[in-house]
Image (cartoon, coloured by chain):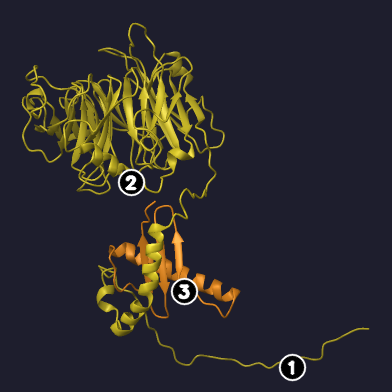
Chain colours: A orange, B yellow
Amino acid sequence: GIPIRTTLDNSTTVQYAGLLHQLTMKARNTVRDIDPQNDLTFLRIRSKKHEIMVAPDKEYLLIVIQNPCE
Amino acid sequence: KSCQTGTISTAEAAVQSQTSRDASVQTDQSKDAVQDFQQEVQVDYTSLLSFLQRVEDAVIKELNKNWRSRAFDGFEVNWTDQNETVLCLHTLSYPEAQDQNLQVTSVSWNATGSVVACSYGRLDAGNWSTEKSYVCTWNLDRRGLNPQRPDLVVDVPSSVMSLAFHPSQPSLIAGGLFSGELVVWDTSRTEDPVIWRTGMTDDTHTDPVYQVNWLPDAKHRNHCRLLSVSTDGKILVWREERDGRLALAEGFAVVAQQMPRSTQLKKFAWGEAAVGVTSLSFSHFDPRVFVVGAESGHSLKCSTAAETLALHWTGSSVPLRAPADFAFSPHGGPVYSVSCSPFHRQVLNLFLSCGTDGQVHLHSMLQPHPLLSLQLSKKYLFCVRWSPVRPLVFAAASGEGNCYKCFCSTGEVHLFDFERSSQKPALSIQQAADERPVYCLEFNVRQTRLLAAGDATGTVKVWQLSSDFTEQGPREMNHLEQLASEITD
């Protein structure tokens, strides 16, 4: 994915964009393989340090990284 | 019954390309390859706007749900095998050195994290020592590792007091000697491993070298310079010369009269004397800033960019400068070790210092009084090191010391975890069976579970730490910053 707007530094942005684009495609394919009538609407990845949220679309991808309070 | 395939019809044709053309493609190295994206992308802003409007609600709903959610509280996933205990993986020693009652004065891990080296000498030798000593290395990843037989033993004519492996070349190791000299060995050479030495010149230290460090050289990228610290008060930087000699490139001298005064510290009584320096640690965030520990009990914040000349630096080929710009409040005895935190990002640089008063002080570089003063034991603390993976953990080595009238000398490695308790160690490991002191310890930066500690019986023990000392918790950095700031208030 080509980053259009970002609030992070450039190298991190490019890294997130590339990796998450691939992961989103994989997730979407997984959902459609299980049920072809279904489609991916939202992807959330929770890690030890934060949560990554991806809102997918035909042309764009919105990635939000949140530090949830514990 | 038999079956037979019918005849298969075949035909032959030949193909030959009549014309051909060559074209080559090459991507140009774009200087700011990453910057380019902001300009080149043709964005259809209206469709982008409608996309954002579509997803905005969903994303905000998820964000709100998240910070209110308690779903994952206390939920932790273990990806690696958790081991709960601290094990002693290896007990390494060199029997010949042990027979001569030599102690382990320093340990160091090499750049790849698979070789540990130790130096044998005596820390309680008094003022003069002509004993020869050894530098031994063991490759822990080798099969057939014999803990009593080091892979390499180097005979050294004088006691080695400190060791440091080169940060990127796995076979180079530097040592500081009791005589004040520095020697660099190349462990891959079979005949004579010595490649550089300072020799005894006018520039050499006049007291034992208690610490050596490799400094990345800003000008020549592949070369490192060596830095040595000694109780003669001098901090010297050496560069390699072609004939195997180490020549003085620059230097600093700490003189009592030039110690930075702080209104809360008492005046110094000893005038022009040099202040012995026992240890040094560079800040991980500003390569010109370093902290030294002195025999007077003070820790000093110094800078390589200092300009004032030191008083009475005679006899040196390069002018020595006074490096200190800030003094921290002293320990009750000489400081033996300082260590700067590799994690603390902001200006409030944290470092630890320990000494013979059995206390570890956690300092911020901004104020003279320690943030925390921990009485770890009643014995001397010889070495303190921050963990390279967990911002809240550090290890300290303790040993001798008189407590009240009895002489109890339990050598222990204390592991401290601010997450669990800010008053007492999370774990105290007794290293030697007969309670001899532990003099030095080093974390392995590559294999982050390993900690090597050397003691007075001449043994190096490699400890494997349990997972709670090596896995960073989710909010550890925040906790560290909180710890630093709540104490300064």
What chain letter is assigned to the residue under label 2? Answer: B
Question: Left of A14 or right of it: where is B234?
Answer: left
Q: According to the image, label 3 marks what residue?
A: A41
Q: Amino acid at mark 3?
A: Thr
Q: Which residue is mark 1?
A: B9
Looking at the rendered structure, the kind of residue marked 2 is Met
Mark 3 to mark 2 CA distance (whole Å): 33 Å
Output the chain of dot 3. Answer: A
Establish if A19 lies above or below B272.
Answer: below
Percent across and percent down for residue B228 are 23, 31
**N-terminal of the two: label 2 or label 1?**
1
Q: Is residue B42 above or below residue A1?
A: below
In the rendered structure, find residue B477 and report the number of the disc placed on it: 2
Residue neighbourhood size for the residue with mark 2, other residues' Cα within 10 Å, grouped as few (<14), some (14–19), many (≥20): some
User: From the viewer's perspective, is B351 left or right of B437?
Assistant: left
Cα distance between the residues tagged 1 and 3: 55 Å
- Front tag of 1 and 3: 3
The part of the image, by quadrant, that contains residue B59 is bottom left
Label 1, residues with CA under 10 Å away: few <14, some 14-19, many ≥20: few
Amino acid type of the residue that numbered disc 1 sits on in the rendered structure:
Ser
Location of the C terminus of chain B by quadrant is top left
> Badge 3 local density, few (<14 within 10 Å), some, or many (20+)?
few
Q: Quadrant of residue B5?
A: bottom right
Residue placed at 80% from the left, 91% from the top? Answer: B7
Q: CA distance from mark 2 to mark 1?
A: 76 Å
Q: Quadrant of the N terminus of chain B?
A: bottom right
Find the residue positioned furthest to the top: B405
What numbered label is drawn on residue B185? none
Residue in the image at 55% along x and 44% along y: B81
Q: Are discs 1 and 3 located on one and the same chain? A: no
